[in-house]
Amino acid sequence: MDLSSLRFAHRFDQVSGSAIREIFKIIARPGMISFAGGNPSLAALPDEKVSELSVQVLRDHGKQLLQYGATEGYPPFLESLKQYVETAVGFRPDAVLPVTGSTQAMDLLCKALIDPGDTILVENPSFLGNLQCMKLYQANLVPVASDDDGMDPADLEEKIKAYHPKMVYTIPTFQNPSGRTLSLARREKVAALAAEYGVVIAEDDPYRDLRYRGEMLPSIKSFDREGWVVFLGSFSKIISPGLRVGYLAGREEIIRKCTVGKQSTDVHTANLTQAIVDQFIRQNLLPDHIRTICADYGEKLARMLGHLEDLAGLVTFTRPEGGLFVWAELPEGLNALELLKKAIDQGVAYVPGTHFFVDGGHENTLRLNFSNSTDDQIDRGMSVLKTIFREAK
Ligand SMILES: Cc1ncc(COP(=O)(O)O)c(C=O)c1O
């Protein structure tokens, strides 16, 4: 029998993923200038330090690291991670769980909380990878309105009352894809709403340290008294995405459920990479490293915004104080999907914004990444895009 009768699980019914996969195939072509991904720059990846730390931890604890470990995490890392969350992120965690990138944190939270048909409130637009994860758990995704200060608490409250969601998913700092940051007052309000209505807030904050201007804001979690907020952290953007180390921090009951869920996913996150991140924390290497990458990314962001200023009056765009993305809106009627074909023909790629919206539309929007391009690539790539956008008008 051929494979035509093969039936995949219904959880894939809402998930295609194909459009973005095509873009990522294209950006792999030699010579392409890519504003499409969310990758750190190659210069930001601390390969020499990681190599040194790998030798050190294998020399000191090789047998333990190469053996199976506990699902709960590599014990020394559990200690340093709790300390790190308290001092660097700014709240005292009840419990933490090291995970295989914060992508897994989202997967485990959904595994712990979401039955098919449960509602999750999401910012619109939002991070594609996690929208896909929620769809795979067959959640009903309901968008909440956002503006320049992030998610609108009035709309959030209305939607909570109307839909009785299990969870709210938010990226409060330098949001992917919009670059927007939830204001201080709204952070406090979101935590209060979670407690008032008994809704879990998944606070996904991988970009908080990538701040190039302005003051760092306290997390939503730091306003949480009852335990409804779960914090999803990641070392991908500040050390390396290839190490695949992130964490969940929150109330013991929730972390425990996620730990049971993780047992059947991957038993545990690699001991070796947990031990490497543990050493980054113990040797206090992060502050200097983050300062260096922020100086570089801040200049790249300013450079890209400078080019976008040339399009003032035609294109509106966010001016984030950090993170990896700028969000741009072309005049109504222009189609960023169509224009991407022209851009690709001239060696430049970006991600059309429509892919980040729960129900599509918004074809005049696009996301631009600046961290993974050189100054020269930003100049050349933006000059191509400026010509295309001006001619399309
Ligand atoms: C908002 C957001 N959350 C989570 C992730 C996933 O990060 P990780 O590499 O830790 O799985 C990303 C990666 O781009 C992201 O943008």
Image (tube, helix red, strand yellow):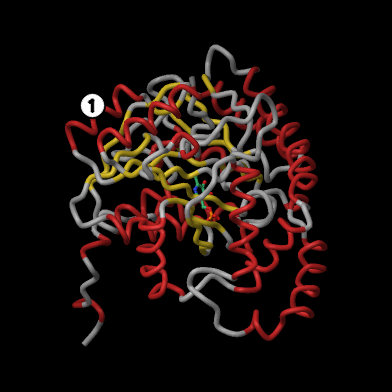
Please tell me how crowded label 1 is: few (under 14), some (14-19), or many (20+) other residues with Cα within 10 Å.
Answer: few
Residue 339 appears in the figure: no
Residue 79: which quarter of the image?
bottom right
Q: Residue at x 28, y 33 (%)?
A: 196
Q: State the SS at label 1.
A: helix
Q: Position of residue 324 (x, y in %)?
A: 61, 39
Q: Residue at x 54, y 32 (%)?
A: 179
178 to 350, vertically: above or below: above
Inspect the image, locate mark 1, and give the three-letter code of the amino acid beneath it.
Glu
220 to 37, vertically: above or below: above
Q: Residue at x 70, y 31 (%)?
A: 212
Front residue of this view, candidates 374 and 211: 211
125 to 17, vertically: above or below: above
Q: Position of residue 67 (x, y in %)?
A: 60, 85
Front residue of this view, candidates 77 and 387: 77
* Figure label count: 1
Q: Residue at x 54, y 69 (%)?
A: 73
- The response on whether ligand 1 sits within 8 Å of label 1 is no
Q: Which residue is mark 1?
A: 158
Report the side of 256 relative to 85 (left or right): left
Instruction: Identify the image quadrant of the N terminus.
Output: bottom left
Residue placed farthest to the top in the image? Answer: 313
Q: Position of residue 60 (x, y in %)?
A: 77, 78
